[in-house]
Amino acid sequence: MASADLLLHPVRLRIVQVFLGDRALTTAELRDELPDVPPATLYRHVGTLADGEVLEVVAERRVRGAVERTYRLRSGNTVVRGADAAAMSVEEHRRAFMTFVAALLGDYDRYLARQDVDLERDLVGYRQAAMYLTDDELRDLIGDLAAVFAPRLAHEPAEGRTRRLLSTILMPGE
């Protein structure tokens, strides 16, 4: 299965998103984070991601005669690489982008469904800006952003830290 096919399924994309931030989770913990996904569906997609080497088993333990596995993302396997992206048709790119946007909408809907929504307190926002950049200037910007994000991506969960999702989309404007 091509990496695009593997990663850009709505349920598998949500599973990958739950693991972002170097999290190690059992399937039971994953079920708690995705309660709207039926258990059989969740197990099937976890198995598909593990077979596709997107998830790796980092621990196993016996629980009431069964083996409980703890999984973590293989970070290098969570991106649709250039060759796979280049091989995708326009319609496949459209479907992949719609899957990505639908995942964003789902995340936002789940946030809004909380009892204590406060966008200002929670620092929730969305915005769009237009910049005029050459390709080299854009590459510099991407490098600058990577340098800013890298130390923050390495933060471990800790008291006072909230897991936050940052999603980016870059495309030329009209």
Image (tube, helix red, strand yellow):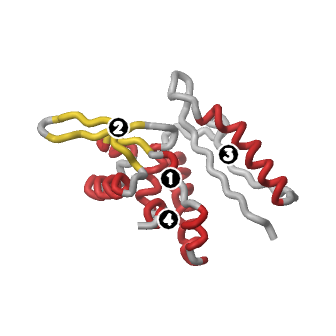
Q: Which residue is mark 3?
A: 125
Mark toward the start of the polypeptide (1 vs 3): 1
Which residue corresponds to mark 2?
58
Q: Quadrant of the C terminus?
A: bottom right
Q: Dividing the picture into quarters, in which one does residue 152 lie?
A: top right
Pair 1/3: label in front: 1
User: Residue 25 placed where, x, y %?
Assistant: 37, 38
User: Which amino acid, mark 3?
Assistant: Gly
Q: Earlier in the sequence, mark 4 or mark 2?
A: 4
How far, Cα to Cα, is label 3 from label 2? Answer: 35 Å
Say which element carries label 4: helix
**Mark 3 or mark 4, earlier in chain:** 4
Nearest to the observer: residue 112 or residue 105: 105
Q: Which amino acid type corresponds to the residue marked 4 in the rendered image? A: Ala
The residue under label 2 is which amino acid type? Val
**Going by the picture, which residue comes out furthest to the top?**
159
First in sequence, mark 2 or 1: give its number: 2
Residue ID at (61%, 38%): 118
Disc 1 designates what residue?
A: 78
Give amino acid for label 1: Thr
Q: CA distance from mark 1 to mark 4?
A: 10 Å
Residue 2 position in % (x across, y down): 45, 66
The N terminus is located in which quarter? bottom left
3D distance between C-alphas at marks 3 and 4? 28 Å
Dot 1 falls on a residue whose secondary structure is loop
Position of 52 relative to 118 (above/below) = below
Q: Which mark is residue 4?
A: 4
